[in-house]
Amino acid sequence: MRIILYTGKGGVGKTSIAASTALKSSKEGFKTLVISTDPAHSLGDSLDMKLSNELMEVRENLWAQEIDATHEVEQGWGKVQKYLTTLFTAKSIKDITTEELTVFPGMEDLLSLLRILKYYKEGRFETIIIDCAPTGETLALLSFPEMLRWWMEKLFPLKKKVIKLARPIAEPLLGVPMPSNDVMDEIDNIYYQLDEMKKIFSDREITSIRIVVNPEKMVIKEAQRSFTYLNLYDFNVDAIVVNKVIPDNVSDEYFKVWKDVQKKYKDMVVESFSPIPIYYIPLFKAEVVGFEMLNLMGDEIFKDENPILVKYNGRTQHIDKDGGEYILSLSMPFVDKKELSLNQKGDELIIKAGNYKRNITLPRTLLSLSIKGAKFQDEVLKIRFGGEDNE
């Protein structure tokens, strides 16, 4: 099975590109699902038909769906939400709607991923194309399980036991309800499903992320930041798609300035993302809506290529042995050396790049070694390990 996520700044055209890729995939004979996790759904508009929260077969080998985030919250967060509502009511919080307090920012998007996990496990489709929320939200979703890993694996099991033992005493003493086993189990279940989803997204043979840009400075700058973040988490970006490029044969004087500007930013895209394959889509004469235009777009992007093949699989981190030392190399594109900081804590390597932070669990080879030095050159952070920790 192949999973392809399209992401990018809002308004770049990722929904149309996701839909056109799915259509081309289905025409190649692959059972294909195109699914929208963006709360501001426009997939139905792109296909020029009304979609729902249920799977809909829209063409031969092609199914489409717009996930209803509210429904997913009720299914996956219902017990926790009910408990929190009871807790807030017990504390007499009445000035704002309790429902607004019981669903945390990004929760709807996170739970939408669990539907994708379900389809993956069922094996019903050969290709799943995902029209993601704009870049920032997508990145937050992908990093969520890793951010919670330590708490969920080391502290949460102890917390469950303590609450179970303390519940009969604490509830009458504090005057507030304690979470039930069902509530704790639901939190546990959500985390491990999301963690499973994260592992699938990190499998380069299964999942690719494709960044959609327009030849505009602000859009490309955001794409660079996204690319850095995705590299930090070792996700495979296998293609960059440049949308709304004014064709060379357009000779109207009005577009001359725009063509010159776009040329500069097309060069910037190549410099920024090479050797990742770059695909160009012209600014069409008509709005890209409906199967005819989507079919045209898909053919324009991929020509005679198979649209679902992994287009690039370059590793962003690797370990080399140098005498008695090991060097861990991490690709960190578009990062200023001054923004980088590095720390080692036990079996974890903590890297900060500007506002982003990642805790990397070190491989077994490096566990007993300490950091001897680090060097950042040509957008690669090289960390040298050597000597026992206790030396």
Image: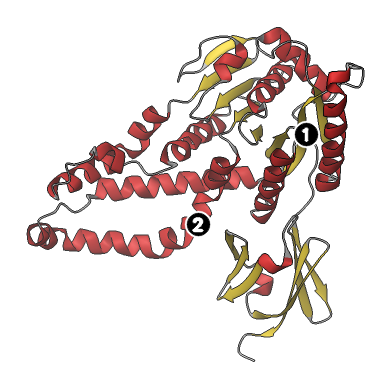
Image quarter of the N terminus: top right
Sequence-earlier tag: 2 or 1: 2
Percent position of residue 15, x then y? 63, 24
- Residue receiving disc 2: 147
Image quarter of the C terminus: bottom right
- Residue receiving disc 1: 215
Vertical position of residue 69 compared to residue 289: above or below: below
Vertical position of residue 258 compared to residue 272: above or below: above
Instruction: Name the quadrant containing residue 218.
Output: top right
Residue 195 in view of the camera: yes
Q: Secondary structure at mark 2?
A: helix
Q: Residue placed at 82% from the left, 19% from the top?
A: 300
Instruction: Name the quadrant containing residue 274.
Output: top right
Residue type indicated by callout 1: Pro
Vertical position of residue 58 compared to residue 373: above or below: above
Label 2: few (<14), some (14–19) or many (≥20) C-alpha neighbours in 10 Å = some
Front residue (pair 26, 383): 383
Front residue (pair 263, 2): 263
Q: Is residue 249 left or right of residue 234?
A: right
* Pointer 2 with pointer 1, Cβ within 8 A: no
Vertical position of residue 20 compared to residue 101: above or below: above
Q: Secondary structure at mark 1?
A: loop
Give the colour scheme shown.
secondary structure
Q: Residue placed at 39% from the left, 46% from the top?
A: 189
Report the residue that reaches farthest toward the left: 172
Percent position of residue 377, x then y? 82, 67
Q: Residue placed at 74% from the left, 32% from the top?
A: 214
